[in-house]
Amino acid sequence: MDAQDLKVEKEKWGETEDGRDVYLFTLENSQKLQVQIMSLGGVITSIKMPDRNGTRDEITLGFDDLASYLKGHPKFGSIMGRVTNRTKNASFVLDGKKYQLEKNAGLHHMHGGSQSFDKRVWQAQSFKDADQVGVDLLFLSPDGDGGFPGNVEARVRYTLNNRNELGIKYMATTDAPTHVNMTNHAYFNLSGAKENIYNHQITIHADYYTDADDTAMPNGQILQVEGTPLDLREPTKIGERIGKVGSGFDHNYVINKEPDVLSKAAEVFHPESGRMMKVFTTQPGVQFYSANWKDRAYIGKGGAKYGHHYGIALETQHFPASANYPHFPSTVLRPGEKYEETVVFEFSVED
């Protein structure tokens, strides 16, 4: 299989409310795996793959049109930054100076603020290499963005190859000391969103997790998963475990890995369809969020109704509140340094 089996197309998908063009990129390989990404928020709007019978379904949550994204959504497929997840009390101290961030989650800061990377139109360019196709994205985050210091040049590279690997590479540089922690907030449902996630089996390769309060804010403790409902080191049917963790999973796991090495973090398997997804990352943590919204449902692709526990988000990341806890792996980025992290989603069909 060579690059001739790989396709990449670009089309104008619409405009933002202030008239900026938004483009949709379609990547497809020889295995009938198709991925769509838009320039607004670098959002993965679609991932389609066959089941064991060859029937291709949509396996990520999203919408059919730009207008639905513009109305608001729970971060479907979005690039999150400058700092994803939670920052305690919406503040941190860096080099002896205290920085106050936007409070957009009660007293705390969440996912980079109300104008996070998912709300921005990125410069986007498709490409085709010898063994992959992809999209390069660029966004310049100004000094003071969300309260964070420094002008940050953020880049994201999406790639798709014939090994059914969807890669995401996050890159950033800064002109002043700051924090950077980027992720993608895609929700997966390997049934094709025909049902909730209870029949999915999940494995997370983590002996520890970051303990948190009832708002999912870390308290600084790193605890063992052994003997708790959070122990997912062996394949676990989600429906048999989720009732033991309150309203659902929203926990950061400490991946069993060496720093900066691309390592397997998790696997998700849907027995009925045969679809399998493996997640590899260079990042030290992964947030497992089980789409815990209760009071509403989202009408998504093809009219699918995304209700309570209809998606699996595996957000590879540095730990939440890393800016607040010096013993967590550092998210500090300084001038002259390069932030660079990778996640790979590998898709397959099992008999």
Image (cartoon, grey):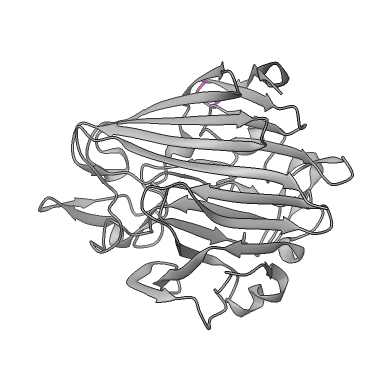
Q: Quadrant of the N terminus?
A: top right
Image side of residue 305 versus residue 75, left or right: right
Q: Position of residue 163 (x, y in %)?
A: 66, 35
Image side of residue 313 versus residue 117, left or right: right
Q: Quadrant of residue 126?
A: top right
Numbered range of the magenta stretch: 16-20
Depicted 227 relative to depicted 186: above or below: below
Q: Main secondary structure of the magenta part?
A: loop
Q: Position of residue 255 (x, y in %)?
A: 46, 60
The residue positioned 56% from the left and 63% from the top of the image is 204
220 or 260: nearer the viewer: 260
Image side of residue 340 versus residue 197, left or right: left
Q: Quadrant of residue 268?
A: bottom right
154 or 49: nearer the viewer: 49
Q: Is residue 298 in the magenta section?
A: no
314 or 162: nearer the viewer: 162
Q: Position of residue 158 (x, y in %)?
A: 54, 31
**Farthest residue, direction left:** 96
The answer to whether residue 15 shows anywhere in this view is no
The residue positioned 68% from the left and 44% from the top of the image is 347
The residue positioned 71% from the left and 75% from the top of the image is 240
The residue positioned 62% from the left and 24% from the top of the image is 24
